[in-house]
Amino acid sequence: MSANSPDAVRRIDHVAVAAHDADRAARWYEESLGLRRVHDEVVEDAGVRLVWLAAEEDLTGAGFQIVQPLRPGPVADHLAAKGEGLHHVCFAVDNAAEFLRTRGESADQVFTGGYGLPCAFLETAPPGVVVEIVEQD
């Protein structure tokens, strides 16, 4: 597949860490690394709180997200099994459902994620790697 293919990844969208307490984690990144909080939201359907941080001079366009579980589910399970730390890497695509279909995955996986955008976690990602895609114009 070429980089110009319509179903190719467009860019790295964000990297996410899982934390039991998003405020405590965000404070560390703000105080220790000088990041600033740019967005905070609850995604009810996923049962998570998302806190987005950015560097003062963000040249890559890639975001940094802290994800905190608000109820039992995949993020809470991840924290119980692996503890706090890297949770997933997210890539931007043109059409999440089509991206999944071309890889033999079900388009039914698409859900509404942060910023109200269509997202999905790839079931065929390599072991030990959690990969998310997000649909962006």
Image (cartoon, rainbow, N blue to C red):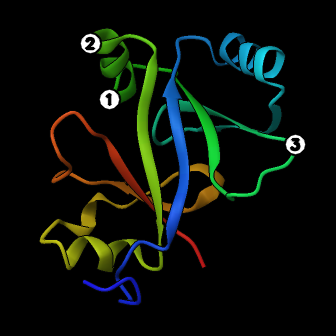
Q: Is residue 88 left or right of residue 82?
A: right
Amino acid of disc 2: Ala
Residue 7 picture quarter: bottom left
Mark 1 touches mark 3? (CB < 8 Å)? no
Q: Is residue 74 above or below residue 118?
A: above
Q: Is residue 75 above or below residue 93?
A: above
Q: Earlier in the sequence, mark 1 or mark 3?
A: 3
Q: Residue furthest left?
A: 104
Tag 3's secondary structure?
loop
Q: Which residue is mark 3?
A: 56
Residue at 75%, 57% (x, y): give it. 59
Quick one: quadrant of the N terminus? bottom left
Q: Which residue is mark 2?
A: 81
Mark 2 touches mark 1? (CB < 8 Å)? no
Q: Which residue is mark 1?
A: 74
Mark 2 touches mark 3? (CB < 8 Å)? no
Residue at 73%, 21% (x, y): give it. 29
Residue 91 picture quarter: bottom left
Q: Earlier in the sequence, mark 2 or mark 1?
A: 1
Residue 118 spot, x, y in % from top left = 48, 64
Amino acid of disc 3: Glu
Q: Residues under labels 2 and 1: Cα distance? A: 10 Å
Q: Is residue 124 above or below residue 77?
A: below
Considering depth in this image, is 89 or 121 the residue closer to the camera? Answer: 89
Tag 2's secondary structure?
helix
Residue 75 spot, x, y in % from top left = 39, 26
Category of crowding for the residue at label 3, using alpha-carbon neighbours closer than 10 angstroms: few (below 14), some (14–19), many (at least 20): few
Amino acid of disc 1: Pro
Category of crowding for the residue at label 2, using alpha-carbon neighbours closer than 10 angstroms: few (below 14), some (14–19), many (at least 20): few
Q: Is residue 109 above or below residue 57?
A: below
Considering depth in this image, is 70 or 14 the residue closer to the camera? Answer: 14
